Image (spheres, grey):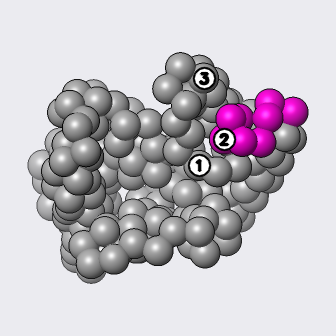
């Protein structure tokens, strides 16, 4: 890769350092969460497969995995299929939407309900507070400064919608719901429907705000 091409890919040395450190922090936080959670669950009789399914059933884990994959892809050769997919503004903006909602929901709703200690607290803060900020910064730096279509905000709703369907089906079978506001066993399906609608509106509103921001950045970049 030529020096000019590399400079275009990474706006500055600092931007590359931010990206590289963000990738490390995100993956280490996920590894830490799995490292401390697997023994804790298995101590209570869970199988390894059961623990992994449980952990992957959290929207937080899924969103952080997408964030880790997305930023890691930006370190790959530009000719790779993975880089071409994750470097698209539509994809990066979708991921920043999901992980931003993770941070907002946790810090506004769930923080007062969950009080982890020791390494669990470290992992919790990284996954719900630090990583969303790191990804947002990287998104501002590396996401293509292009105008996204307003209709794309609707496409981003598919991921949380399918996650909701999966969670409700699994919850009905196992009586486990990862988040209290979608606990159909305690709240009932009518309340869950209302809560889910509110969350989808939040996703849609934030998605529209992000599109508005990309359009503003696009105009600024052309100025």
Q: CA distance from mark 3 to mark 1?
A: 14 Å
Residue at the spot of label 2 = 183
Q: Secondary structure at mark 2?
A: loop
Q: Is residue 187 magenta?
A: yes
Residue 52 seen in the figure: no
Q: Which residue position is annotated with label 1?
A: 179
- Compare residues 58 and 153 and report the one nearer the observer: 58
Q: Note whether 62 is above or below 75 in the view shown.
A: above
Where 6 sits versus 171, above or below? below
Mark 3 or mark 1, whichever is nearer to me: 3
Decide: few, some or many residues near mark 3? Use Cα within 10 Å; few <14, some 14-19, many ≥20: some
Which residue appears at 63% of the width and 62% of the height? 105
Residue depicted at 77% across the width and 42% down the height:
187
Residue at x-position 31% and y-position 68% = 120
Give the vertical position of 23 relative to 41 (above or below).
Answer: below
Q: What segment carries the magenta color?
A: 183-190
Residue at disc 1, secondary structure: loop
* Dominant secondary structure (helix, strand or loop) of the stretch shown in magenta: helix
Query: Residue 172 bears which disc, if any?
Result: 3
């Amino acid at each position: 890769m030529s020096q000019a091409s590399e400079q275009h890919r990474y706006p500055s040395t600092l931007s590359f350092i931010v990206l590289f450190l963000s990738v490390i922090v995100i993956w280490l936080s996920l590894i830490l969460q799995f490292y401390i959670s697997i023994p804790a669950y298995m101590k209570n009789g869970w199988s390894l497969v059961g623990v992994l399914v449980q952990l992957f059933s959290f929207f937080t884990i899924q969103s952080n995995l997408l964030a880790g994959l997305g930023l890691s892809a930006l370190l790959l050769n530009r000719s790779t299929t993975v880089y071409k997919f994750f470097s698209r503004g539509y994809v990066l903006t979708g991921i920043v939407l999901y992980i931003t909602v993770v941070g907002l929901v946790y810090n506004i709703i769930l923080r007062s309900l969950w009080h982890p200690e020791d390494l669990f607290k470290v992992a919790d803060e990284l996954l719900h507070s630090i990583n969303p900020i790191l990804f947002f910064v990287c998104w501002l730096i590396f996401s293509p400064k292009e105008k996204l279509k307003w209709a794309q905000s609707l496409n981003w709703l598919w991921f949380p919608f399918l996650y909701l369907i999966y969670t409700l089906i699994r919850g009905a079978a196992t009586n486990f719901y990862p988040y209290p506001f979608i606990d159909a066993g305690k709240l009932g399906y009518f309340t869950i429907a209302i809560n889910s609608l509110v969350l989808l509106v939040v996703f849609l509103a934030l998605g529209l705000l992000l599109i508005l921001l990309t359009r503003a950045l696009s105009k600024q970049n052309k100025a």
